[in-house]
Amino acid sequence: MSHEPFDAQAAVHAIGALDPAERAAFTAHLRRCARCQATVREGHEALAALLAGLPPAPPPPEVAERLLRRVEVVAERRRLNRAWLVGTAIALAAMVVGGLVIGGWVAARYEARLTRAARELTEVRERLRRAEGALAERTTVAPALVALLRDPATEVLVLRAPGLDPQPRGRVVWNERAGGYLVVVGLAPPPPGRAYAAWTIRTGVARPAGPVTLDPQGDAVVRIEPTGAPVDAFAVTLEPEGEGPAPTGPVVLSSR
Amino acid sequence: MSPAGAELIRAMAAGDREAFRRFYDRYAPMVFALLLRILRRREAAAAVLEDVFWESWREARAYDPAAASPEAWLVARARDRAVARLRASDDPAAPGAAAEPGAAPEPLPVLGGLLEWVPPAPRHALRLAYFGGQTETELAELLGVAREVVRARLVQALESLRRARAEAAR
């Protein structure tokens, strides 16, 4: 298609005389066509040159006054906007810094809390491990005790605190041939640096039968190995830690 | 065409209010003459003049000196605004008759200069289209000729002006 019709359209467009529908279509073409853009540009320049030949007409002075006032107002608004922007930027920066400080503080607090929680968890695990150990021990002790009790030669002796307290505080299930178990219930924890110790007594001589280690409830089960001879009595004493060959501390429980 | 005018627009884009004042002083009389010729009423012409220069201040940043001289930039804008206002009035064929009753139309200054280079029929069509805001179809009806004839006259008018301008620049 020849470009000639567009050249004519460009000239009429520069004058501003295209009919509305044609103007819309031509404007779309103009955006892509450098040649038509040049024609319109030259047309505008020619028309502007034509007007330069018109006698100038001084406009009413109030137009200039109004325009300069409007320009001042806008400049003032821009200054205020700039000041507002600076203020806002400072406020935002303060918010960011504040946020970082608070965030850091919160993070530190949570870190401390997490550390504490981790420590508590470790403690709980340790307690659980000990409880599991104790339970396992009792599950092995229980069938052994039942087996012992089935034996007619087995006797059960009551352990009491010395003095007037009649309440049994423990028992010894004892079989001369197979040995037995010393069971204590609800003993107070030993004072620091002391420990409970079990003894077998024969002909007035006490022989060590092992440490009595309490669980958190104050209970303990101590295996007592057979002595190879009859035992007259069983006792629990409070000894300095690192039990010696003979009792030195007070008797806490006795089968007598 | 007018580097000084382009300099002023650049300064306006940077917010130079003094440049705007000088720009207005320099071009407002030419633009106002065009607006008076189209609108024929001082009040209407003054209102459009204010709009056109206000837009030039606000859009100074978009001005491209390679695309238009300051005169062409202002004149194209002013002519479009004035014709739009003219056509928005009740009787576009009789501009000024419906608006501002009581105010006498401005006497039209005689066009001379470059227009003398344009043959009579194209010159007449150009005056009706450019200053009267008539479209090709309206002109065809008004002049009782085919639309193609109007187009040929307008093209010839602009070509004559373009040649005259080139001659004058020599």
Image (cartoon, coloured by chain):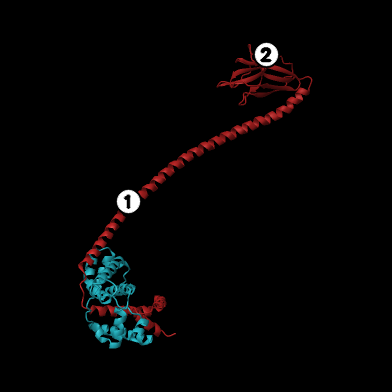
Chain colours: A red, B cyan
Tag 1 residue? A87
Tag 2 residue? A205
Is B49 located above or below residue A136 in the figure?
A: below
Which chain hosts label 1?
A
Q: For the residue marked with disc 2, what is the amino acid? A: Val
Is A126 located above or below residue A82 in the figure?
A: above
Image location (x, y in percent) of residue B135: 35, 80
The answer to which image quadrant residue A67 occupies is bottom left
Q: For the residue marked with disc 1, what is the amino acid? A: Gly
Q: Which SS class for mark 1?
A: helix
Image location (x, y in percent) of residue B39: 27, 75
Look at 62% across and 33% down and name the residue there: A129
Q: Is residue A90 visible?
A: yes
Residue A49 or B37: which is nearer the viewer?
B37
Which chain hosts label 2?
A
Image location (x, y in percent) of residue B57: 28, 66
Task: Please tell me which of labels 2 and 1 falls first in the chain.
Answer: 1
Query: Between tags 2 and 1, which lies in front?
Result: 1
Is A20 located above or below residue A153 in the figure?
A: below
Residue B37 or A232: which is nearer the viewer?
B37
Q: Which SS class for mark 2?
A: strand
- Considering every residue shown, the one lying at the far right of the view is A152
In the image, A161: left or right of A112?
right
Is A190 located above or below residue B9 in the figure?
A: above
**Distance between the Cα atoms at labels 2 and 1?**
94 Å
